[in-house]
Image: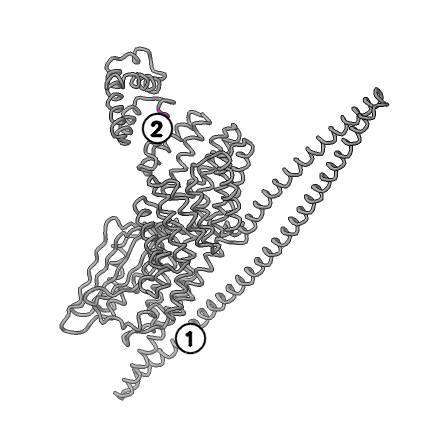
Amino acid sequence: MFLYYVPKLVGRFVLFHVIYFEKQPVYQIFNVRKCLFLFVILFSGHLANAQSQDVFHRVDSLKLLIPSATDTAKYTLIFNVAYELFDVDNQQAVLYANQAYQLALEIGDSLKITKSGRVLGQLLRRVDHSDEAIAQFMKILPITERNNLIVEQKRILNALVAAYMNEAMYDKALLYSFKSLEIREKEGDKMEISVALGNIGLVYYKISDFEQALEFYNRALEAKREVGDKKGLDRLLINMSLCYNYLGKYEKAKEFVNKGLKICGENCDDVIKVEGEYCLGISSFKLKELNEALLHFNKSYEIAKRIGDRRFEAENIFEIAEIALEKEEYDTAFVKLKESEMLSLAAGYNQILISTYFSFSKLYKLKKEYERASFYQSKYIQLKDSLYSENLIKNLAKVQGSYQERVNLKTIREQDEILKLNQVIISKARAQYFFILTITILSILLTFVFVRFNRIQQRTNVELAKAKREIESKNQVLELTNAELDARVNERTEELNRSNKSLQHVNDELDNFIYKTSHDIRGPLASLKGITNVAMLDVKDTLALDYLKKLDSSAEKLNTILTRLVIVNHINHATLHPERIDFKEMVNDILVLEKKKGIPHRMTISCDIQPEAHLISDKSVLRLAVENLIDNAIKFYSDTDRLDPFVKIEIQKSEASLVEIRVIDNGIGIQEDDQQKLFQMFMRASERSETGGIGLYLAKLATEKVAGQISFSVLENKLTCFSISLPSDLNKVIDRQKREDQQRLS
């Protein structure tokens, strides 16, 4: 056994000797203790690798060498640590990849910069930081172009395509896919051409152009068959089956999935299993085989959850919700759609979010809750228009047109080369003819050969002329297609402009109405209260005083309602200023205000704030939401002597980088018929309401202003619970919205 490892150990010892002792003084190189220590590490590391392939053991061995290494040797060690941790511990791998990249910048080696920068970008995408990954790739891509680093350039282009696809920026994804294809076509490597064609097909699939996607998938499949390449063939077949599903060819889709799964057999990768089961679920669902479809989606979901594939978690949850809708299991559909919405919002899966909003609208239409249906319909339209914007359509058309133009030019160049070649042949033939004619003018045989050859050339010229006419005809068709596409884009642009102007006009009229109403009524109302107060000083009759007090109380309630309407206008036009929220200070300030209003006898108010519940949001807008929920819980307490009224305020960190605020009370509760209308303006669930039913509407409006969601539920023992879910950092939400606005305007 030892003799088997000796040659390998010697080779590895030499490798580490070069890495570790590079640029070290000679007397340090032959330090016996260091050599012995290094040899022990190598020997133990090799045995561990041979027995168990323990990644973390190798990483620890490399880390031991980093502090003593310098320059290139240090870069190599840090880069290898990042590479070993790739898809094992991506969060830690990002740190080491960044160190390697910074060190490569200091060294100034272009290859090291692009290689470590690419790995850093790929890791950032794997930890759902696609925007940072794109920025990283765009930094190093020009370096590969300047230094003609073709291998790294191809890898970076593929990574850029994946990152832009993750961000639903399909025009950029298509542009860099075509660039990648152009490089590979110049090299002529069919295996790599097949990969690039598959990537282009995937982009067209994402923008729902399934026929175009199938065209590129078939070209990729043909390229693989030409060279007998089976690598990635299983995934390619499954991708093609997804297209057949959306084209309504469900049996053919099943056939392609089964072919793909048969290729890898029992050794199928988990990612392939996730996609295959998902595709079979789609086919079964479309064929109305609901129970079989549910089995496939659940199986795909479990594998996706185990391997951490959040996109397919969301995809499968959404399809399970669709099955529940089909079965009219509306409660199950609501729960699954909520899970899909939360997961898609957290990870930025906008394509899934569009489908989720549409299904929400469909669910509420089936339940005849038309206001909620309209709400989700508007969110669906808004998000869809933001993704498939005018600029996206133009950019896609431009990219596709550029590619088609390049293909046409290539065809024309090839035809021109053929024409030139034939002209050379004709020229030589004529010279040969005159030479033979001069020498053997009496040779009938050679004359016959010349005539025969001349006829062949004429037929060739006719074929070439015909080919040229066909090319010109295709160019004319392409010009007509481009003109038609431009007309459609212009028509869509005009529709969007009209819709935006109409919506802006409605919003302006609503704001103007609230502003003028509150100010026009406040003056007469103040006069009424003044007259009432003066009358109460002069009138001595008890009955008249009682009427005047009721009139004053009603006027005060109306004044409160007007104040809250002004707050609605303030929230709609508020400019957000995110800052770190001190929940303890905010809750204490609210409770001080409530004590001034009056807290019911025997009521206890408790507050539980988790230390890890960190939130960056707009303080004033968030306070409006929390204050209204606490005020609502105190106001509608239960006045029965059998219960001691209480209000619990819980603030905690939940999953997917969200912070949740819960206000729980044992008050009078809310009737089931009123629960669906709780957050509507002027909705009063009890006669105790003094604000005309605006409090919960304000809470909902303020919550949505800071990108949160508010909900109501009934807990055990009939406890009432209002919950607010907020993104932990509002700055990220604002930045993302700004980027999306800039992309729409660009």
User: Left or right of 99: which side holds 441?
Assistant: right
Residue 94, horizontal then vertical, whole percent? 35, 36
10 Å crowding of disc 2: few (<14), some (14-19), many (20+): many
Task: Tell which residue pokes out farthest to the front in this image.
Answer: 445
Q: Is residue 160 magenta?
A: no
Answer left or right for 221 relative to 481: left
- The answer, for residue 104, to whether it is visible in the render is yes
In this view, the residue in front, 608 or 655, is 655
Q: Nearer the viewer, residue 245 or 399?
A: 245
The segment highlighted magenta reads 74-81
**Mark number displayed over residue 80:** 2
Q: Determine if residue 341 is in view.
A: no
- Residue under numbered circle 1: 521
Quadrant where the N terminus lies?
A: top left
In the image, 400: left or right of 735?
right
Q: Nearer the viewer, residue 139 or 411?
A: 411
Viewer-proximal residue among 704 and 205:
205
Q: Amino acid at mark 2?
A: Asn
What residue is at 54 percent from the left and 40 percent from the top? 178
Which percent across, then down, holds residue 210?
50, 51
Residue type indicated by callout 1: Ile
* Badge 1 element: helix
- What percent of the width, then of the height, locates residue 456? 75, 34
Do callouts 2 and 1 mark residues in contact (Cβ within 8 Å)? no
Near mark 1 (Cα within 10 A), the count class, few <14, some 14-19 or many ≥20, is few
What distance separates the C-alpha of mark 2 from that of mark 1?
A: 73 Å
- What mark, if any, has residue 586 been given in the picture? none
